[in-house]
Image: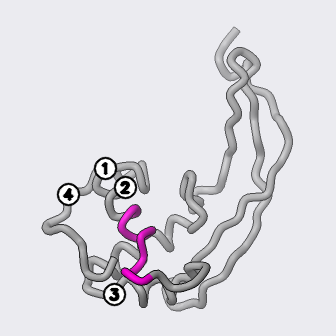
Amino acid sequence: MGGCLQVVGHGLRDRQIRGCIDADGAAVCITIRVRRYRCRVCGAMMTVVPLGVAARRHFGAGTLGLAVSLFGHGCQARRIRERLGGLGAPEVHGWVTLRRWTAALVRGSLLARLGPLPLAEPMSRGA
C-alpha cells in the first residue's frame, strides 16, 4: 500500500491565530477549524492548516514577518508587541518572544519555506 493510504481523517480542531490581518490593521485574534489526520501505521497526528498559518506559533505568518521586519528596521520590541497584539503584562526587557522568532528565523525554523536567513548584525534593541 502507498503511504497516502495509511493516513486517515481524525476530526477537526480549533486553531487560534493572533496578529494583524493586514499591515495597517489592528491586531485581532481569530479561531479557525483545521483538519487533523492520523497515520494508521505509527499513530502520528498531523494537522493541515492554511498557508498563512505558521506551524507551532500562535501568531500568523504575516504577523511574524511584519514583527521581524519592524524590529530589523529599528522599531522597539515593546512597541511591536503593543502593535501586534502580544498578550499579558508588558515585559520589563522588551519582548522575549520576538527574540525567539529572530533566532528561529536565523536557524530556518520560523518560516520553514524561507530556510535560514543570515542577519547582518545581532538584533538586541529592547528585545
In the image shown, does 86 or 6 lie closer to the viewer? Answer: 86
- Which image quadrant: the N terminus? top right
Q: Which residues are magenta?
A: 92-101
Sequence-earlier tag: 3 or 4 = 3
Q: Which residue position holds label 1?
A: 107
- Res 86 → quadrant: bottom right
- Magenta portion: prevailing SS class: helix
Q: Secondary structure at mark 3?
A: loop
Sequence-earlier tag: 4 or 1 = 1
CA gap between label 3 and label 4 equals: 21 Å
Q: Secondary structure at mark 4?
A: loop
Instruction: Please state the horizontal and vertical placement of residue 90, each as a whole percent of the image.
Output: 51, 85
Q: Which residue position holds label 4?
A: 118
Give the amino acid type for the residue marked by disc 3 in the picture.
Gln
Q: Are marks 1 and 2 in contact (CB under 8 Å)?
A: yes
Q: Residue at x 33, y 87 (%)?
A: 76
Sequence-earlier tag: 4 or 2 = 2
Q: Is residue 67 visible?
A: yes
Instruction: Please state the horizontal and vertical placement of residue 99, each as a whole percent of the image.
Output: 36, 67
Sequence-earlier tag: 1 or 3 = 3
Q: Are marks 4 and 2 in contact (CB under 8 Å)?
A: no
- Res 54 → quadrant: bottom right
CA gap between label 1 and label 2 equals: 5 Å
In the image shown, does 123 or 115 lie closer to the viewer? Answer: 123
Give the amino acid type for the residue marked by disc 1 in the picture.
Arg
Sequence-earlier tag: 3 or 2 = 3
Q: In the image, is residue 82 part of the stretch drawn in magenta?
A: no
Give the amino acid type for the residue marked by disc 2 in the picture.
Ala
Q: Secondary structure at mark 2?
A: helix
